[in-house]
Amino acid sequence: MEDLQLLIDLHKGADRQGPGGDTETEKALDISMLDRSEPLKIADIGCGTGASTLALARLLKGHITAVDFLQEFLDVLKTNAEKEALAKRYRPFAVQWITYHLEMRSLMFFGLRERYTILVLTVMVD
Ligand SMILES: C[S@@+](CC[C@H](N)C(=O)[O-])C[C@H]1O[C@@H](n2cnc3c(N)ncnc32)[C@H](O)[C@@H]1O
């Protein structure tokens, strides 16, 4: 078995793949003083199995773009979102974040895409 598959198998059953939790997400929203009734545009880059994606979907009215290069993590997100009837609140992209970022930059440049109000970034940026 390859190292990446071992990592996926180890982490995909966990509640989340990074630090924090729903309480911390809610606290961050409080601090940001965003209007929760606004239809915000949110990007969760490196969403993993979607702990933050789903927390934000529960707490806000906006629509979430969930990006992760591991389809298996996005599959878990889909199952969990369907259980909570939140599947319509997000759109998954199984791509490298840089590909997604560059594509969005060009669309924004041509005025075809709005900026995100909230950006959750948990990938390595080097
Ligand atoms: C530390 S985990 C955080 C997961 C999730 N945000 C959470 O808090 O549970 C980082 C995630 O970023 C994804 N990732 C890492 N590098 C990436 C890249 N270059 N493009 C897209 N996703 C990436 C990994 O697959 C992993 O799911």
Image (tube, rainbow, N blue to C red):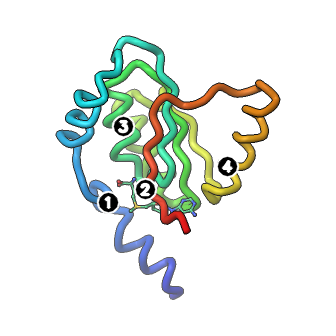
For the residues labelled 3 and 2, the Cα–Cα distance comes to: 15 Å
Disc 1 marks a residue whose amino acid type is Gly
Q: Residue at x 57, y 43 (%)?
A: 92
x then y, percent, for residue 42: 49, 32
Q: Nearer the viewer, residue 109 or 112?
A: 109
Give the residue type that dot 4 points to: Tyr
Residue at image location 40% in from the left, 47% down from the top: 50
Name the residue tied to disc 4: 100
The residue at the point 70 percent across, 27 percent down is 113
1 or 3: mark nearer the eye: 1
Query: Circle 3 — which element?
Result: helix
Is disc 4 placed on a helix, strand or loop?
Answer: helix
Q: Is mark 1 within 8 Å of ligand 1?
A: yes
As drawn, the label of residue 122 is 2
Tell me the quarter of the picture where residue 83 sits. top left
Considering depth in this image, is 25 or 68 the residue closer to the camera?
Answer: 25
Pointer 2: residues within 10 angstroms few (<14), some, or many (20+)? some
Residue 88 in view here: no
Gap in angstroms between the C-alphas marked 2 and 1 = 8 Å
| Mark 3 residue crowding within 10 angstroms, few (<14) / some (14–19) / many (20+) | many
**Mark 2 within 8 Å of ligand 1, using the beta carbon:** yes
Q: Residues within 10 Å of mark 4 (few under 14, many from 20)?
A: some
* Disc with the residue nearer the chain's start (1 vs 3): 1
Q: Which residue is mark 3?
A: 54
Q: Earlier in the sequence, mark 3 or mark 2?
A: 3
